[in-house]
Image (cartoon, rainbow, N blue to C red):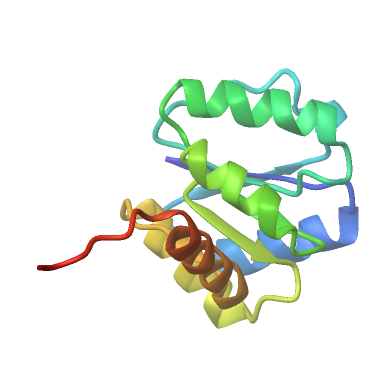
Amino acid sequence: MNIYHLDSQSSYREGIKNILEIHFTGIKVKSYDFYNYKEQEPTSSDLLIVEPFGNPEIAQIVIDRHLNRDGKVFILSTELHKKTALEYLKMDVKGYATKNILTMDLVRAVQDIIEGKRFYVSSVASYLHEQYLENSPIITCN
């Protein structure tokens, strides 16, 4: 298994790579900007961590291609886009967090996603819960 981190900010990308290499010693961590990533072909067992809003068109292509292979995708974004997070959930993205995530939460998120679980920051989870309640059918008991 490999972890691929795609982000347009090189210093942030390298910092995340260093954190992940320290905590996941048996996993190869690779970081790219979107233009240098095009040649890579991760397998379905690989985790793709993406900042989609720096280059949204290319990011969407990369995300779609990885999800079509049943790959795991974790959105690590500069901003919280609640409605976009809901769309990503519908696409089966495994996690969504903002870049100000604490290191221990980032490590837990990656571990959870590797194990097949999901990870959403609390504000996204709250929004998803609100959307569920607003759109769920009303069941009455007689």
Q: On the rendered structure, is 78 left or right of 118?
A: right
- Give the residue displayed 45% in from the left and 33% down from the top: 71
* Camera-nearest residue between 75 and 138: 138
Q: Position of residue 56 (x, y in %)?
A: 83, 35
- Residue 44, above or below 11: above
Question: Residue extending furthest front?
Answer: 142
| Numbered circles on residues, count | 0
Residue closer to the observer: 98 or 140: 140
Residue 24 appears in the picture as rendered:
no
Question: Picture quarter containing residue 13?
Answer: bottom right
**Is residue 103 shown above or below 6?**
below
Classify residue 129 as left or right of residue 98. Answer: left
Between residue 104 and residue 15, name the one nearer to us: 104
Q: Position of residue 99 (x, y in %)?
A: 75, 68
Asked if residue 118 shows in the view, the reply is: yes
Residue 34 sits above or below residue 93 on the image: above
Looking at the image, which is closer to me, 42 or 100?
A: 100
The residue shown at (46%, 50%) is 27
How far from the left and from the top, in percent, is residue 10? 88, 53
Q: Position of residue 98 (x, y in %)?
A: 71, 67
Image quarter of the C terminus: bottom left
Q: Residue at x 61, y 75 (%)?
A: 123
Q: Quadrant of residue 122?
A: bottom right
> What quarter of the picture does the N terminus occupy?
top left
Residue depicted at x 13% and y 68%: 141
